[in-house]
Amino acid sequence: MHAFLETDRLALRPFTTADADHLLALDNDPEVMRFINGGRPTSREAILTRTLPRLLHDHPCLGTRGYWAAEEKATGTFLGWFEFRPLDEHSPAVVELGYRLNRASWGRGHATEGARALIDKGFTELGVERVTANTMAVNVRSRRVMEKAGLTFLRHFTGDWPEKIAGSEQGEVEYVLDRREWERRGEGGAATATATG
């Protein structure tokens, strides 16, 4: 399938309904889901009726989707996904960056590599003015990826958790990167990425 974006090691491509089994395995790893839902299992029905429709949604203001399946370029192995989705359906100005990768890819720099490439593409090709990302305050790994991708801490806040999970009482954090700051740092083109569509 045609890749949306490639880096040295990753290919980010559009999701299809054939990815249901990949998503089911990803969302049923308690460690992957620890800071999302406390590690509770996800049903196939939830993947088909809630997850996939969200991942398959097109955002006309970006001219593309907001979620991308991440594969290891050399092997085609499914690693998880990246989010780069406009917060306002009608404007590409502010996008949310996110990622969910399987445990086998943790600690290998994949999240940072994919995040940097998406940020570069957003600022150079998609009309993005600000990238924002948030996570639970206790999610140190995810916060580190945000920092390595060039985002800086903006605020600590308390979200509305429908069901409390371990650590949610410590709140959430938001990180941001504006186009001006990205340009000031000279980060344009810093990530080795090849836009292919």
Image (cartoon, grey):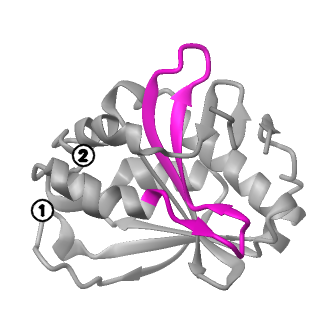
Image quadrant containing the C terminus: top right
Label annotation for residue 1: none
Residue found at x 39% / y 37%: 18
Q: Position of residue 36 (x, y in %)?
A: 25, 59
Looking at the image, residue 97 lies above or below residue 171: above
Q: Looking at the rendering, which quadrant does residue 154 occupy?
A: bottom right
Q: Residue furthest front?
A: 17
Residue found at x 71% / y 76%: 61
Q: Crowding near pointer 2: few (<14 within 10 Å), some, many (20+)?
A: many
Element type at marker 1? loop
Label annotation for residue 27: 2
As measured in the structure, the alpha-carbon distance from the residue carrying label 2 to the one carrying label 1 is 18 Å
Looking at the image, residue 65 lies above or below residue 24: below
Q: Looking at the rendering, which quadrant does residue 164 occupy?
A: bottom left
The residue identified by callout 1 is 166
Q: Amino acid at mark 2?
A: Asp
- The magenta-colored residue range is 55-83
Q: Amino acid at mark 1?
A: Ala
Q: Is residue 35 visible?
A: no
